[in-house]
């Protein structure tokens, strides 16, 4: 071991660390790789490992193929029925060679499928995407993220206060936290939040017993997507929405236009600087906490606790780091996304629960969701 690589203190020499080091030497061995590829018992494992490593190398190409399939109209065209190559070329505005290259690339990653020679339909992944407008909205939005990650080391070495494409889009992440933003900016990020929040809302509603409560305040509720879905499922629940002035104005218009049930109570202000509205026995933070650094996130939890009566509950819904089966989503995706945004970080469930305890909550617990890749839940009692 090269001691100069390890400043004091030296890494612990535990059995687990020795076992991982042995495994890594084995996997890095070209002779072992050749043996595994030839061995009938090890060959399937070796192929899966090789494919997984290649996916790390080629992943950006896959995402750009997906973006091209969305923005060219290819997936929309295939959703309407079988398409010939001439149909695809006409839809995408590409010549025959380029259209063939695109649809075959899309088929290779499951977005399209050649059902019969020369006739194309949606593939399994393409069908799933077309049924999820929020995912499609995020694919389009990722142009900003990819631009910020063009030189990832430069991004990580830079000052997080420096402007980025994502911080310019998510204007609420900028300092100072103003209670109002340009109406156009609020409309842009509120629209994306609304598009991408339907699946999150449905996961939360399916997992939590809202019928045990009389009222709910959604802090940072955006244009009200979560509350509209919740109102349809629990029409007797009194609802409140608290967000920035321009966002609340958008939410009010959305409710007036699209919702025929009971209107929520609208509270305008910044949850980072203004008092949290009182009088609700349940408060929700849906994809809010991970957008903020530790100090403002801790203050928000303390302010919420201060506004709650004893026995009231706080529901935290967001993707969490180190979630079994969704590890890459936490630290690899949201870790870099939030760094580029200039605010926030993915947190493990135990970190959030420790923050809740520090904020004064008496107890907290995790609640299982059907799709932890979409969101995880923690409920805390004041």
Image (spheres, rainbow, N blue to C red):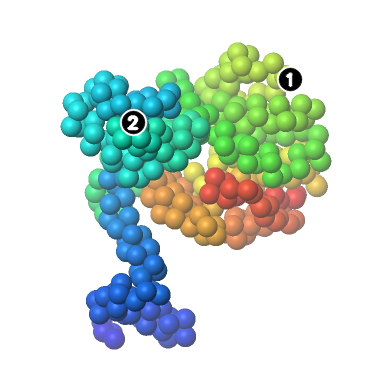
Q: CA distance from mark 2 to mark 1?
A: 49 Å
Q: Report crowding for label 2: few under 14, some 14 to 19, many 20 or more residues within 10 A (C-alpha).
A: some
Q: Along the line of sight, which residue is nearer the eye, 347 or 280?
A: 347
- Quick check: 366 above or below 241? below
Q: Along the line of sight, which residue is nearer the eye, 243 or 145?
A: 145
Q: Along the line of sight, which residue is nearer the eye, 118 or 94?
A: 118
- Quick check: 227 above or below 355? above
Q: Give the number of the disc on residue 119.
A: 2
The reply to whether residue 342 is visible in this rendering is: no
Which residue is identified by label 1?
A: 262
Q: Secondary structure at mark 2?
A: strand
Q: Quadrant of residue 317?
A: top right
**Residue drawn at (70%, 55%), measured in percent from left and top?**
364
**Residue drawn at (65%, 18%), measured in percent from left and top?**
259
**250 lies left or right of 70:** right
Residue 108: give x, y in percent of width and height. 32, 45
Residue 311: give x, y in percent of width and height. 80, 47
**244 lies left or right of 331:** right
**Residue drawn at (42%, 46%), measured in percent from left and top?**
338
Q: Secondary structure at mark 1?
A: loop
Residue 2: give x, y in percent of width and height. 26, 84
**First in sequence: mark 2 or mark 1?**
2
The reply to whether residue 118 is visible in this rendering is: yes
- Quick check: 339 above or below 180? below
Residue 39: give x, y in percent of width and height. 34, 76
Q: Report crowding for label 1: few under 14, some 14 to 19, many 20 or more residues within 10 A (C-alpha).
A: some
**Residue drawn at (71%, 26%), measured in percent from left and top?**
232
Q: How many marks?
A: 2
- Quick check: 192 above or below 258? below
Is the N terminus in the top left, top right, bottom left or bottom right quadrant?
bottom left
């Amino acid at each position: 071991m090269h001691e100069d690589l390890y400043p004091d203190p030296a890494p612990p020499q535990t059995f687990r660390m020795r076992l991982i080091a042995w495994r890594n030497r084995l996997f890095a061995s070209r002779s072992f790789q050749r043996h595994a590829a030839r061995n009938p018992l090890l060959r399937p494992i070796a192929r899966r490992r090789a494919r997984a490593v290649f996916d790390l190398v080629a992943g950006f190409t896959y995402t750009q193929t997906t973006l091209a399939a969305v923005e060219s109209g290819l997936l929309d065209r295939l959703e309407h029925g079988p398409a010939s190559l001439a149909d695809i070329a006409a839809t995408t505005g590409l010549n025959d060679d380029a259209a063939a290259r695109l649809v075959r690339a899309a088929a290779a990653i499951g977005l399209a499928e050649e059902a019969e020679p020369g006739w194309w339909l949606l593939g399994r992944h393409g069908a799933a995407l077309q049924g999820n407008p929020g995912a499609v909205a995020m694919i389009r939005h990722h142009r900003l993220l990819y631009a910020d990650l063009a030189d990832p080391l430069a991004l990580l070495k830079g000052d997080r206060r420096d402007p980025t494409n994502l911080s310019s889009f998510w204007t609420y992440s900028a300092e100072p936290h103003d209670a109002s933003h340009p109406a156009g900016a609020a409309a842009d990020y509120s629209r994306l939040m609304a598009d991408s929040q339907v699946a999150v809302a449905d996961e939360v509603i399916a997992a939590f017993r809202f019928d045990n409560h009389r009222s709910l305040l959604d802090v940072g509720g955006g244009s009200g997507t979560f509350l509209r879905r919740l109102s349809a499922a629990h029409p007797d629940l009194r609802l409140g929405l608290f967000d920035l002035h321009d966002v609340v104005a958008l939410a009010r218009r959305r409710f007036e236009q699209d919702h025929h049930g009971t209107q929520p109570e609208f509270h305008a202000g910044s949850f980072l600087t203004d008092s949290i509205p009182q009088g609700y026995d349940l408060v929700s933070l849906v994809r809010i906490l991970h957008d903020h650094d530790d100090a403002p996130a801790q203050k928000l939890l303390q302010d919420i606790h201060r506004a709650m009566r004893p026995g009231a509950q706080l529901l935290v819904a967001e993707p969490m780091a180190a979630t079994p089966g969704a590890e890459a989503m936490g630290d690899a995706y949201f870790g870099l996304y939030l760094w580029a945004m200039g605010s926030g970080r993915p947190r493990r469930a135990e970190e959030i629960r420790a923050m809740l305890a520090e904020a004064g909550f008496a107890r907290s617990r995790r609640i299982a969701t059907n799709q932890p890749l979409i969101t995880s839940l923690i409920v805390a009692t004041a």
